[in-house]
């Protein structure tokens, strides 16, 4: 039964993005890790006595977390504004309340990790800071029982969509915008930056126990997942970002809608514009339907009531804070934002799009026309570093780990992969 009395209007959808305009800008972080057994580095299942479900249940008792449930199954925990959730293959994700300073985010991550440590030891689990499962492939990783994941797995196109869903882990940085003009500048710049930062933070070379030859197999998986809802959300337009992004979402086929506790499959039969105009069976579009649909789109940079920058592999913790520092230095300083725009304005949409397809294999060694990506990445970091230094908060220190690596033409994976190879060959 559909209880929606009035037809959803595009003006209501537009307000979702307009409501994101803020005067006080903060940083947000979503941090995924691969749960592997310390015995053999295979992925830990949701099910069983020592599975992720039991682990979440026990961890909830450590500091009075509330359960997040889907049809009575535990699919995460919540405490105030922080959540611990599991992605389709049980990737362990921490989402934190946005903060003004990076040290505040670091302090909260340190606190949660300290609480996790004894329980992880008891369960013989390691939360691996890596961008792809190093041993188990998707055929041996069960989906957790969250109902939407089964629908997504059956629907999503692309030859590596199962890899993306079950094997990969990333970090996501969220930045605020003050108005639509500010959102447009930041959104376009974040998209242009994304192949460069994918290269800088590449950390997913080992998959299925072997060296894939790709600096970021995670990035390759995303390139081969449902092109209609992944990639770039707009073509770097300079005006009317909110409208152009809404148009992007309107034309994406729908996967499902939800009414109370019931999930109604749509499986791509219509896009959201058709749903808005004509409904589906006995259902009319609601604003909650649009929010759900928007969260089932996975561009490298996603627009919400903030900007989600989603293209980074999971990396060791010191580099996570480097990613936060990089975006804070550039996005929250008008001069730095302008400098980064000037640096990248020589490349158009087609060049960036084509370059994006070569980054997973070549990383910082990729060439973009006459330019070495490593050299452009170094300039990007210098812009952020100088910006942070002038803010007198000493947050440029968080950039040092990635700055030192990039200057050598290295990525986190160049450090982590040899260590991981040694560990895997022990089993």
Image (cartoon, helix red, strand yellow):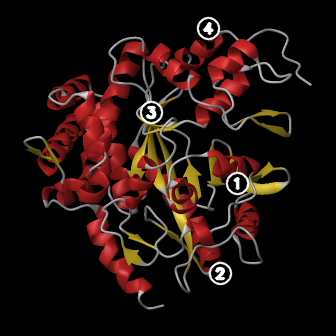
- Upstream in the sequence, badge 3 or badge 2? 3
The residue where tag 1 is placed is 76
Instruction: Indicate the secondary structure of the residue bearing disc 3.
Output: loop
Camera-side mark, 4 or 3: 4
Q: Is residue 398 left or right of residue 13?
A: left
Local crowd at mark 3 within 10 Å, few (<14), some, or many (≥20)? some
- Which of 315 and 384 lies nearest the eye of the viewer? 315
Instruction: Indicate the secondary structure of the residue bearing disc 2.
Output: helix
- Upstream in the sequence, badge 1 or badge 4? 4
The residue where tag 2 is placed is 122
Q: Position of residue 338 (x, y in %)?
A: 21, 24
- Which of 367 and 301 lies nearest the eye of the viewer? 367
Instruction: Indicate the secondary structure of the residue bearing disc 4.
Output: helix
- Upstream in the sequence, badge 1 or badge 2? 1
Local crowd at mark 2 within 10 Å, few (<14), some, or many (≥20)? few
- Which of 120 and 100 lies nearest the eye of the viewer? 120
Tell me which residue sits at (35%, 67%) in the image.
205
Is disc 1 in contact with disc 2, using a CB cutoff of under 8 Å? no
Camera-side mark, 1 or 4: 4
Tell me which residue sits at (46%, 45%) in the image.
172
The residue where tag 3 is placed is 26
The residue where tag 4 is placed is 11
Local crowd at mark 4 within 10 Å, few (<14), some, or many (≥20)? few
């Amino acid at each position: 039964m559909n209880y929606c009395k009035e037809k959803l209007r595009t003006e209501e959808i537009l307000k979702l993005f307009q409501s994101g305009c803020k005067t006080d800008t903060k940083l947000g972080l979503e941090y995924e890790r691969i749960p592997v057994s310390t015995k053999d580095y295979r992925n830990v299942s949701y099910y069983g006595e020592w599975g992720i479900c039991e682990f979440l249940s026990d961890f909830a008792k450590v500091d009075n977390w509330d359960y997040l449930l889907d049809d009575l199954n535990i699919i995460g925990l919540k405490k105030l504004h922080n959540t611990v959730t599991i992605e389709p293959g049980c990737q362990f994700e921490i989402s934190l309340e946005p903060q003004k300073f990076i040290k505040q985010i670091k302090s909260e991550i340190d606190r949660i990790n300290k609480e996790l440590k004894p329980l992880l030891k008891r369960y013989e689990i390691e939360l691996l800071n890596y961008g792809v499962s190093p041993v188990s492939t998707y055929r041996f990783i069960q989906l957790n029982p969250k109902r939407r994941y089964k629908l997504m797995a059956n629907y999503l196109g692309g030859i590596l969509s199962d890899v993306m869903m079950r094997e990969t882990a990333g970090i996501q940085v969220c930045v605020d915008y003050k108005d639509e003009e500010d959102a447009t500048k930041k959104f376009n710049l974040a998209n242009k930056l994304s192949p460069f930062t994918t290269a800088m933070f590449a950390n997913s070379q080992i998959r299925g126990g072997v060296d894939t030859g790709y600096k970021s197999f995670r990035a390759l998986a995303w390139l081969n997942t449902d092109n209609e809802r992944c990639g770039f959300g707009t073509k770097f337009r300079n005006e009317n970002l909110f409208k152009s992004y809404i148009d992007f979402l309107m034309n994406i086929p729908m996967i499902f809608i939800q009414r109370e506790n019931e999930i109604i499959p749509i499986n791509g039969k219509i896009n959201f514009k058709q749903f808005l105009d004509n409904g589906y069976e006995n259902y009319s579009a609601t604003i909650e339907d649009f929010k759900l649909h928007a969260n089932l789109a996975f561009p490298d940079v996603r627009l919400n009531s903030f900007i989600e920058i989603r293209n980074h592999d999971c990396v060791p913790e010191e580099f996570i804070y480097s990613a936060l520092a990089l975006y804070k230095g550039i996005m929250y300083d008008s001069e730095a934002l302008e400098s980064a725009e000037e640096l990248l304005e020589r490349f158009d949409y087609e060049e960036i799009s084509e370059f994006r397809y070569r980054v997973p294999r070549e990383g910082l060694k990729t060439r973009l026309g006459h330019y070495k990506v490593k050299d452009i990445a170094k300039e990007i970091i210098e812009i952020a570093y100088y910006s942070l230094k002038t803010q007198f908060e000493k947050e440029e220190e968080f950039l040092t780990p990635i700055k030192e690596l990039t200057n050598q033409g290295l990525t986190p994976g160049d450090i982590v992969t040899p260590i991981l190879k040694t560990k895997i060959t022990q089993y």
